[in-house]
Image: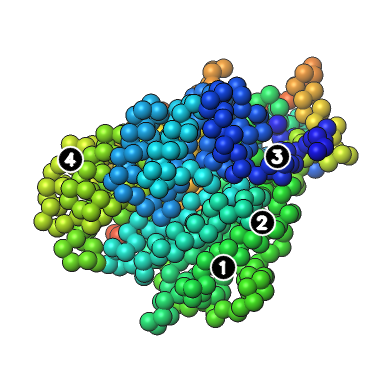
């Protein structure tokens, strides 16, 4: 069960999560960061690092934000997938 | 009974399974599964309730990338690390017969057997029971093994022998149905060690002996823990008389048990989150303990906080009893062979009274060795390959289980850390400072990298399209008077490049530290970027 980056990341993109991800599964889009659900190992290291509480375990994503689960997956199948985010 | 909801969180699932049937109630079922085979085990038992009996399925060697295999790790609960040579012989024989001779000493003073088949679990249990040993409560959402100083009762410098109290707290809580379903694991140490060798700072409850004048009492710390959100335990302003200690421990366990707010998210369910997320303070926590007990404690006495440097009790040292010494064997990363175990057990019987203890540094201590036999013991032990006087790196190295067996690990850690200790001895010979290098295979921090001088946390790197194992480097962690969590300095590299990076850092320490300055103090005055530059050699 991967972690999901939700709306609070939009225009913030702090990238503290990128520094701690042990498998480099966080990518950077124009507006926000994304976690590749096929690469995430569910270790939870990123979750406490986010200064805006944007990162949530997939099963715990609140109802109004559940579309971010699909967004974090679909963006990698799009014609313009995000690139690996760089550590700070 | 209603079935699980359509969208069930990990916490909801575990809580439902624990509610549906108490995990400790399935011992007879496990014996039946042993007759009927691995495939007869229901998923809810295999993945939740087995843990309350100290049993995890092990991984296929690929850690988080791999799958579980039909073999088990069994953790054998060893309160205060208390052992007899008969127990050590028993577990060595079990390891040879059922565990492919693979056995580790853990940093909570337990043993872990690997490669066990379900068919063999009852036989192993029965053999353990014959020497007064159990795996009950060694994993799962209950009170884990209560740890305590391996030198309790023999250390001339100790505040008091608290081992009987540690074992009493263990027996009060383990197997007690009132404490069968806690929100998460619960770790307690009770110690009279002046060096706090069992790390009360990172336990849910850390109980340490203290003297108020000539009066013995105990101080209590609560809410320590590591993982992805490290938190040093908070010290309660209370002087607890010895006769109240078990009640206080039980009351704290009850507060934790009753905190339903912790049962909604498995990653935020340890007791520390009462303080991190739910507004509790050391003051309000103490008030609640006193309210439940109906008793007010005096304010805490003056505490001599240990300097945090030496906590391993390795080597031969005189005991408080005239004519007797203890012999602390340095087991790198806790990995030991059955012949080595038998050898040490035999030495303990031949030259002592057969009493041994495991340590929180994954070592083994033989107690009550007669002074006139020390020279012979040292001579005979040299053939075992487990030194009594480990080098600086050998004594300071500790690791988690790693991807060899753990399903959560990102990297292999046991063999890596043993190789690393040996290589560092060659690369930086004669280093006087004992630098503690703790290796952990993933962010869950079972290898305690947060409190190490140098902490290595496993990562996976992608190089030229290939995935390779690597480590993030942390520096400057400490406990006691040096209490601080290690800093991630932004240096991540392949596992095979770590020895050269650490050599550069250690050589810079030797060249750049002032006389008598500890590694902790030296690295504490460097900026992260400077440490990163030293590690990278650029």
Q: Which of marks 1 and 3 is nearer the N terminus?
A: 3
Q: How far apart are marks 4 and 1 (CA)?
A: 45 Å
User: Which residue corresponds to mark 1?
Assistant: B248
Q: How far apart are marks 2 and 4 (CA)?
A: 48 Å
State left or right for residue B450 relative to residue B229. left
The residue lying at 23 percent from left, 54 percent from top is B353
Which circle marks residue B257 in the picture?
A: 2
Q: Which of marks 4 and 3 is nearer the N terminus?
A: 3
Measured as percent of width and height from the top left, residue B285 is found at: 65, 68
Q: Is residue A71 above or below residue B105?
A: above
Q: What element carries label 2?
A: helix
Measured as percent of width and height from the top left, residue B471 is found at: 49, 34
Q: How far apart are marks 2 and 3 (CA)?
A: 16 Å
User: Which residue corresponds to mark 3?
Assistant: B17
Tell if the residue under mark 4 belongs to the same chain as the one under mark 3: yes
Q: Distance between the residues labelled 1 and 2?
A: 14 Å
Q: Distance between the residues labelled 1 and 3?
A: 29 Å
Is residue A54 visible in the rendered image? The answer is yes
Q: In which quarter of the image is the C terminus of chain B?
A: top left
Q: CB under 8 Å between callouts 1 and 2? A: no
Tell if the residue under mark 4 belongs to the same chain as the one under mark 1: yes
User: Which residue corresponds to mark 4?
Assistant: B382
């Amino acid at each position: 069960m991967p972690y999901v980056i939700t709306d609070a990341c939009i225009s913030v993109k702090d990238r503290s999560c990128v520094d701690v991800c042990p498998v480099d599964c966080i990518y950077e889009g124009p507006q926000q960061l994304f976690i590749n659900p096929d690469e995430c190992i569910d270790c939870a290291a990123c979750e406490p690092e986010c200064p805006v509480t944007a990162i949530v375990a997939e099963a715990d994503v609140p109802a109004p934000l559940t579309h971010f689960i699909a967004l974090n997956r679909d963006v990698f199948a799009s014609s313009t997938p995000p690139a690996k985010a760089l550590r700070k | 009974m209603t079935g699980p909801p359509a969208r069930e969180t990990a916490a909801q699932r575990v809580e439902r399974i624990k509610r549906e049937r108490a995990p400790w109630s399935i011992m007879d079922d496990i014996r039946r599964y042993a007759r009927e085979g691995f495939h007869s085990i229901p998923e809810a038992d295999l993945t939740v309730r087995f843990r309350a009996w100290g049993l995890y399925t092990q991984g296929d060697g690929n850690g988080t990338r791999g799958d579980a295999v039909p073999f088990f790790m069994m953790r054998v609960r060893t309160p205060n690390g208390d052992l007899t040579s008969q127990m050590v012989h028993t577990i060595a024989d079990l390891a040879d017969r059922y565990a492919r001779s693979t056995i580790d000493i853990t940093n909570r003073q337990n043993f872990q057997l690997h490669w066990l088949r379900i068919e063999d679990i009852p036989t192993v249990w029965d053999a353990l029971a014959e020497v007064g040993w159990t795996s009950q409560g060694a994993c799962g959402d209950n009170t884990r093994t209560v740890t305590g100083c391996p030198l309790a009762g023999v250390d001339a410098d100790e505040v008091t022998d608290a081992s009987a109290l540690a074992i009493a707290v263990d027996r009060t809580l383990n197997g007690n149905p009132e404490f069968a379903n806690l929100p998460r694991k619960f770790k307690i140490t009770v110690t009279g060690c002046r060096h706090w060798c069992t790390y009360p700072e990172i336990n849910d409850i850390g109980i340490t002996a203290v003297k108020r004048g000539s009066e013995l009492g105990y101080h209590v710390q609560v809410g320590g823990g590591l993982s992805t959100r490290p938190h040093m335990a908070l010290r309660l302003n209370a002087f607890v008389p010895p006769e109240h200690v078990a009640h206080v421990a039980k009351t704290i366990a009850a507060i934790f048990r009753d905190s339903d707010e912790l049962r909604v998210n498995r990653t935020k369910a340890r007791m520390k989150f009462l303080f991190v997320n739910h507004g509790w303070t050391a003051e309000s926590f103490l008030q609640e303990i006193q309210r439940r007990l109906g008793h007010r404690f005096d304010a805490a006495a003056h505490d001599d906080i240990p300097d945090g440097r030496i906590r391993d009790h390795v080597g031969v040292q005189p005991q408080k009893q005239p004519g007797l010494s203890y012999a602390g064997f340095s087991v790198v990363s806790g990995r030991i062979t059955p012949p080595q175990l038998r050898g040490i057990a035999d030495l303990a019987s031949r030259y002592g009274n057969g009493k041994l203890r495991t340590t929180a540094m994954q070592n083994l201590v033989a107690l009550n060795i007669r002074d006139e036999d020390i020279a012979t013991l040292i001579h005979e032990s040299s053939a075992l390959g487990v030194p009594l006087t480990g080098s600086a790196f050998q004594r300071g190295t500790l690791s988690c289980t790693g991807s060899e067996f753990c399903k959560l690990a990102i990297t292999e850690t046991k063999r890596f850390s043993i190789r690393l200790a040996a290589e560092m001895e060659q690369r930086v010979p004669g280093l006087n400072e004992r630098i503690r290098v703790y290796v952990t295979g993933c962010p869950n921090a079972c290898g305690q990298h947060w409190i190490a001088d140098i902490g290595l946390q496993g990562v996976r790197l992608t190089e030229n399209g290939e995935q390779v194992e690597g480590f993030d480097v942390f520096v400057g962690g400490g406990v006691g008077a040096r209490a601080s969590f290690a800093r991630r300095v932004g240096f991540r590299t392949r596992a095979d490049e770590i020895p050269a990076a650490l050599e550069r850092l250690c050589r810079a320490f030797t060249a750049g530290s002032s006389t008598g300055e500890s590694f902790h103090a030296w690295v504490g005055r460097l900026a992260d970027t400077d440490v990163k530059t030293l590690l990278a050699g650029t």
